[in-house]
Structure formats: structure tokens, C-alpha cells
Amino acid sequence: MVAKALIYVENVQMTKLLAPLVLILLVLSPLSAHARDFENVVIDPGHGGYDYGLLVDGKREKDIALNIAKKLRQFLNEQGKMAYLTRSVDRHLSFDDRRELSDKHTPEVLVSIHLSDTDSAVVYVTWYKNLEADLSLDEYYSLDSRQRRYLYESRILAGSVGDSLGSEFGMNVLYGELPLPLLSTAGEPAILVELPSKGINYDDDTMQRFAYSIGIGLILYGQQ
Ligand SMILES: [Zn+2]
């Protein structure tokens, strides 16, 4: 939480005004061993309802994503974390639904789960057309800009989850940036994980391993 507050302050261009306050807060706050430690995760299983996503050996991306999301929730609960799903049943959600359902839980981390159409995993963070632009205060505080102040943290998060997937499965992990609305509007570190669809048999054990390795990546992120 301390790290989050600092990033926020640095970006608001009010550093001079707030610096004394930050110093006081730092002195008063008990020093956390892990500044990125989190309590509360939202997991977003991609697709749902009439939107099947990819078809993999007769299995549907929406079902695979939901199954892994539930297993990931279970794993995180066992690690003492709160974890919520944007959907826990097979139903269609609009982007606005996902945004609203996620924000309701004020998560500290957001992970969206999808499949890629390759044999690699791909971990995405959001992309902004003009990251260096000076934004007006209105623009800065708009929903679309929320992720700007968490971009660095999101990249650290992406690296941690990608490393974990790579070491568990020995597979190729790619990283990408895309202007994905669910990521760009996230007011917390946020990634979208695409798991490989090629060369994987999504049986129950495999989905458990994916959930476990994403979960380990999240836990290790919190310990950095
Ligand atoms: Zn998808």
C-alpha cells in the first residue's frame, strides 16, 4: 500500500506540496516487509454466455477460463487472500459489467484469463497511445487513464506471472501491450493472461496446474 501511495503522488505533479505528508506517512507507517503484498484479487474469466471465445479440441475458451478462474480463487483463498470472480457462471458480461463488478470489490490486483491461439502464453498489460502526453486533471482522473499510474506495477506483475507459467510448464511466454479497456480502466495493477490453446490438453489436472502457476506468480509478486 505504501508503494501504491507513492506512485500515485509522484504522478499527480503535486509532489512538492505533498512531499512532507508522504514523509510523515512513511515515518508513521509500520514498515512492511513486502510493499506489494495484497489482500484482495479480482479474477476475470474471459467470454461467457453466447460468446464462446476459442474452440480447443471441442472445449470452449469461456469454460476453460471459468474453470481455471475458480481453481485460482480456491488457491488464493488457501493462501489467505480474498479473491472474487467477475462471473462464476456461464453468462455474458459486457465490458461495463466487468468494470463495475471488479470495482465493487476494490481489488489490489486484477487478472483476466483467456486463451491465445498459439502454443505460447501471452501476458498483456495495457497500452496507451500517448503515454508521455501532459493530461489535464480531468483527463488524468478519467476512467480511461486510471491504469497510467499502475503501468510499472502491472509490468512487474506480468513478469512474475509469466515467469511462474514458464517455469511450471517450460513453455514460451510472450509479453505484450494492448489497449484493452478492462486493463486501461483498472485502478490497480492489472494483467490479461492468455494461456496457450495449441499443444495443451485442458483436462482437470492441467487446469489445476495453470491455476496454481498463475497463483504462485501472484503470491511471488506480493512478496517482492
Ligand atoms: Zn479470449
Image: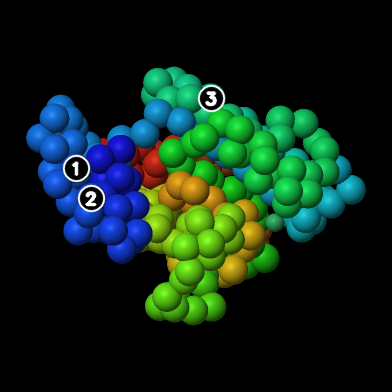
User: Residue at label 1?
Assistant: 21
x, y percent for residue 140: 48, 62
**Left or right position of 95 against 173:** right
Q: Which of marks 2 and 3 is in front?
A: 2
Label 1 to label 2: alpha-carbon separation: 5 Å
Label 2 near label 1: C-beta < 8 Å? yes
Residue placed at 77% from the left, 31% from the top? 89
User: Residue at label 2?
Assistant: 18
Quarter of the rendering containing residue 63: top right
**Label ID, residue 100:** none
User: Residue at label 3?
Assistant: 74
**Quick check: can you spot residue 82?**
yes
Q: Is residue 11 above or below residue 132?
A: above
x, y percent for residue 111: 53, 46
x, y percent for residue 173: 45, 63
Residue placed at 34% from the left, 52% from the top? 8
